[in-house]
Amino acid sequence: MIIELGHFALILALCLALLQATLPLRGAARGHAGLMTVGQTAAVAQFVLITVAFAALMNAYVESDFSVANVFENSHSLKPMLYKVTGVWSNHEGSMLLWVFILSLFGAAVALFGDNLPPALRARVLAVQGMIGVGFLAFILFTSNPFLRVHPAPLDGQGMNPILQDPGLAFHPPFLYLGYVGFSVAFSFAVAALIEGRVDAAWARWVRPWTLAAWCALTIGIAMGSWWAYYTLGWGGWWFWDPVENASFMPWLVGTALLHSAIVVEKRDALKSWTILLAIVTFSLSLIGTFLVRSGVLTSVHAFAVDPARGAFILLLLVVAIGGSLTLYAIRAPSLGGGGLFAPISREGALVLNNVLLATAAATVFLGTLYPLFLDAVGGPKVSVGFPFFNRTFVPLMVPVLIAVVAGPLLAWKRGDLLGALQRLWVAFAAALAVVLIGLYLSGFTPILAVLGLGLAAWVAVGTLTEWAERVKLFRASAGETWRRARNLPRSSYGMTLAHLGLAVSVAGIAASAFEVERIELLHPGDNLDLAGYQLHFDGTEKIEGPNFAADRATIEVTRNGAPIAVLHPERRFFALQQMTTSLTAIRTTFMSDLYVALGDPDETGGSTIRAYWKPLVPWIWIGAVIMAAGGVLSLLDRRWRVGVAARRRLPAAHPAPGE
Amino acid sequence: MRRLLYLLPVVLFVAVAAYFVLALRPGRDPQLLPSALINKPAPSFALAGLSGSDGLRLDALKGQVMLVNFFASWCEPCRDEHSVLMQLAKDGQIALYGIAYKDKPEDAQQFLKRLGDPYRGIGLDESGRTAIDFGVYGVPETYVIDKEGRIRLRHVGPLTEADVARELLPLLKELAHS
């Protein structure tokens, strides 16, 4: 009964989305206030209905109601409760429901917190959100309905892919979708602006917090996915340039460009049509990411069950959403008009450089991802262009980004003084040089690129701190003056500093991964293994029983110069239901390096293959991502985005906003 | 002119969408990827080997029916394929040679150490030159070369057990008796 209620709520939500997609547009065109407010009511009601639908499905999972086909196919009564809950979105149908749930959440947020928006703009934004909702709700109801029953009800479910039964992966999709779907707001604002034919600084001010929120969630989502791959797949890799990873990385790259170009629109009223294009492309790439995973166009650990009907439906959605918005762009964008002029060497110029490089990087990833798919299209199977391609194209593009990320904030708007900026960066340059020289000395000149990468990280970190020091006049004014300035800097400024520092931390972690030490040995109980100054003593394995698996659990004592450091227990888990073996690695981290041990196959003589790695700075990759996201959140807390400020900004003479 | 520039994004998207339509076309057969080199002599190669082993020279290998498999440690489909290759090489009847495509020697070595080494000999194609001569699209890719040194079959993408049983073994048997 509850499941039918959820089904019914979802159908109602589709009907409401249809209203939301049409009536407010008509109202905005005619200036009819009543029709315009339909959008708000419909958006909030849609959110409530989809919440009911989502809760109904989750209830079926928690109760293990195997008369629901989706639960039967993806759950099992013995599964731990956490995975019963997360199982809701670890399959195609449920994850689409999560997708529209988040979409409706953002729609409702625009409806509820958008009081400072001009009514016509809000109506149009909500209408575009409604159109996206129509597309995806129809997709769920017609091709991927999670509310279908099976008769007779089976006794138990088929279980969930053991690889997905992991706390890290459990919350990876929600964050990823918050990012993907969050960009829909920027998209809706862009399309609404194209319909109105007007983009101004106020528009950018409304778009930027939404973009920033989505970007933060996507950053965390991607980092979680990478971390999960690192500790589950058992060979210590953390990024594979897998098509599905790329599918999440491309919107991140373009979204990062969008964040930066929206600053130029907000502050300088320039780069308008480019920013609109970025907003459209960011969400389009999110949609394409959804398409790639679900259409059966590619296979990967991430791919869902294949169904050509779904692929065709999503392709249709893509054509309507992306093709439609880009056509509108082609018609309306030329008349948007330029804004403030600026010299090539200026803050705007630096942001344009950032945009060009990030967009090119995204295009490279796009090509590298689609080239194997292109083979598929002409009849070839899955191949991988892999690391060599991306290392040779993507990495060189990131070097100028990292160099410029420091210089940009030191340049003035309109016309900057590059020489002056570089002179102020001598400390950063010296720090980078010192890191490179020490690195070369310690590592014996190999691998030289990794050492240069560490130097770049030092450049970004010290350069970013220099920019902050300049702003607060550190050591150039009295301590009291510096303190006063430090307190008065807007939060968005601290947000930028933090995000750029996070970037430096991640870059250092990525560069240092070249220095890892790997040992793979067949060990018998009692054997020892030396790894980067640690001694690993293999005590043997024992059999243990989990709730829905049986495992071999190894005991490995780690010592350093005789002093005990840790006892590690890597496991190999066998899931009888799915006939699958997964590996649970044991990691001891000091946050400066990881000791990573995975248990491989046993052999006939009672030995086991042990894969042991020492990975310097590797936790920094994810710590850096968290710092970047924290920078984004801090920036979101800036008081100029508080509700009502944007409205006041339009009357600056009457009520100047505080802290501007 | 300026207006045309604004049309560019939608034009690009149409191209991408057309190509997704092709990708979705039902019933495409992955086996149908012809090689220009079928029944032609295999391009000659002389490659360095992994540390401590000999290199790979086509001239030295001629006179037997053999499989040449392009692989790389960074390639995920190759990991999928590897167990099939191990199975294939288990009884030692089949002459299987590996060419590590754009791979660092130490990475290739680790890859084989980790997953097992099914190859009779391994050549390093760090520049990708040999792969270009063969017309390799991407890894993994496998070629069957007959006793006269002619390419008889090209398989793009990972070999599956079904591929081996349906396509590879019959051909190898036929070539061995010819």
Image (cartoon, coloured by chain):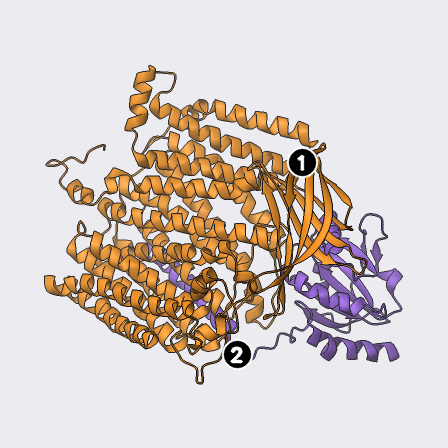
Chain colours: A orange, B purple
Question: Is residue A516 positioned above or below A544 on the image?
Answer: above
Q: Residues within 10 Å of mark 2 (few under 14, many from 20)?
A: few
In what quadrant of the picture does the C terminus of chain A appear? Answer: top left
Q: Residues within 10 Å of mark 1 (few under 14, many from 20)?
A: few
Is residue A584 or residue A183 the one in the foreground? Answer: A584
Is residue B71 or residue A407 the one in the foreground? Answer: B71
Which amino acid, by three-letter code, is at mark 1?
Answer: Pro
Q: Residue furthest top?
A: A478
Question: Is residue B93 positioned above or below A388 on the image?
Answer: below
Q: Please name the residue that numbered disc 2 is placed on.
A: B26
Q: Which mark is residue A564?
A: 1
Say if mark 1 contacts mark 2, CB within 8 Å: no
Q: Is residue A656 left or right of residue A412?
A: left
Secondary structure state at the residue bearing disc 2:
loop
Question: x and y percent of residue B106 in the render?
Answer: 74, 47
Which amino acid, by three-letter code, is at mark 2?
Answer: Pro
Question: Is residue B103 positioned above or below A654 on the image?
Answer: below
